[in-house]
Every structure is written in C-alpha cells, then in structure tokens.
Amino acid sequence: MRAAVIILLLVIASGSASAQFYDKMFFVGWNVNQPFSNKDFIEKSSSRGARVGYREMLREQIAIGIDLTWATYDDYEPRKTYNYPNSTLTTDFTNYANNYGAMLTGDYYFFVEKKVMPYVGFGAGLGYNSYKVYYNVYSSGDNSFGFLMRPTAGCWFKFSETKNWALNAGVHLDFSTAKSTDVGYKNFTNAGFEIGLVFLDW
C-alpha cells in the first residue's frame, strides 16, 4: 500500500513538473504610442493601439512567431483662414494616421519558467499606413506600404504557477518606410508602451 502511494505521488509530481513547461504563447496587448516623425501633421500621442501575437519556442530561451499591430493617431487643427494666390479658405480640419503591421518576430528570454521573465525582441515585416485629412465635408489622403521593424523589451509577470496566463508589459520603437509626399512623410517613426496578457499553451 505504501509503495502504491509513493508511486502515485511520484506520478503526480512528475505531471506537475512537466505542466510548468510550455512551447506556445499567444499575446494580446493595448498600446499607447507617441509619433516622432512629421509632427506638423500628427504630434499627439495615441491610446488607440493594439498588438496580437503568437510565439513558439525554438529552444529554451528563444521564441519565434508573428505579430499583427494597429494604431490610430489624430490631431485637430482649429478653424483658421488660409490665403492662397487665387483663393481664400476658412476651415478647421483633423489629420489622421492609421498604421498597420505584420511582422516575423523573435524574442530572447533571460530566464525561463520563472514568475518574472524579462525579454528582448525584434520584429521585421510589412507596414501599411493610411493618411487622411478631413475638412468641412471634404477629405483627402494617401496610402502607402513600406518596410516595418520593431525592437522591443519587456517583462512577464506570472502571479501563480497554476495559471496559464501572465501579465505582459513592455516598450517598443517602430520604424516604417511607408512614406507620403502628399502629407510630408519620408517615414513614420513612433515609440510605444504596451500592457496586456500572454496566454501559455502548457
């Protein structure tokens, strides 16, 4: 009887130990971003951003996967009169920039299987930017594709060993070559802060 109990405890312990390992991760996060390029068009920070990502462990401390990102910026200009050689225009207007990205991403985790897991990462892929100006009942704009890269750094916080999720907090810097001569963008650069969740496929 005692031997059976010991064997049962060993099986449970080995099962619990193996449950601490995971090889797939799903991210969802809310982003706050600050634009750096062409502040004449957009200079306000934006809290309308998000990231969805997937990672798979390549080896013990390295994961690779894909990120899908989105952010919207807007900036309001009060009503003014603009004088042109042959005309005069009085209006207010709102500038919009919408950024979308799809990247292949790799992360390096300094520690694994810990409650606190700091990491650094780098993503590269395709960016799509939409620039719009709305004035009175009219609008104009431009759309462009470009190369997008995003270095990141952050940390996971696991509150319980028995849960298959953790809090994720991090910072990132985005650089996109999606330019627009219509609204004066040679590129689009922004920095951001993210807070969200990571779900661990144990």
Image: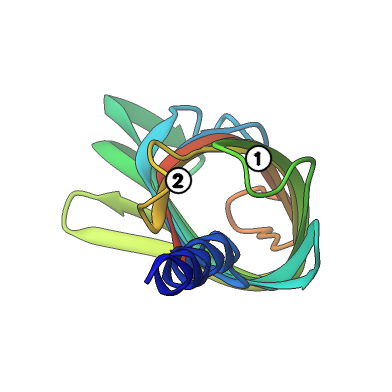
Residue at x 65% of width, y 40% of height: 172
Q: Find disc 1 in the rendering and name its residue.
A: 172
> Residue 7, how many percent across, how many down?
50, 72
Which quarter of the figure is the N terminus placed in? Answer: bottom left
Q: Find disc 2 in the rendering and name its residue.
A: 86
- Which is more foreground, mark 1 or mark 2? 1
The residue closer to the viewer here, 83 or 158, is 158
Q: Check disc 2: other Cα within 10 Å, few if <14, some if 14-19, many if 20+.
A: few
Q: Is residue 133 left or right of residue 16?
A: left
Name the element at disc 2. Answer: loop
Looking at this rendering, what residue extends furthest in the left direction? 137
Asked if disc 1 and disc 2 are in contact, CB closer than 8 Å, the reply is: no
> Residue 116, how many percent across, how many down?
58, 33
In primary-sequence order, the first of circles 1 and 2 is 2
Does the image show residue 89? yes
Q: Say which quarter of the image contains residue 60.
A: bottom right
The residue closer to the viewer here, 104 or 85, is 104
Q: Check disc 1: other Cα within 10 Å, few if <14, some if 14-19, many if 20+.
A: some
Does residue 118 lie above or below 146 as drawn? above
Does residue 134 lie above or below 118 as drawn? below
Name the element at disc 1. Answer: strand
Residue at x 50% of width, y 61% of height: 13
Does the image show residue 147? no
Residue at x 58% of width, y 51% of height: 183
The residue closer to the viewer here, 64 or 112, is 112
Q: Is residue 186 left or right of residue 85?
A: right
> Residue 156, how many percent across, how many down?
54, 40
> Alpha carbon of mark 1 to alpha carbon of mark 2: how far?
46 Å
**How many numbered marks appear?**
2
What amino acid is labelled 2 in the image?
A: Asn
> Residue 158, how many percent across, how many down?
46, 40
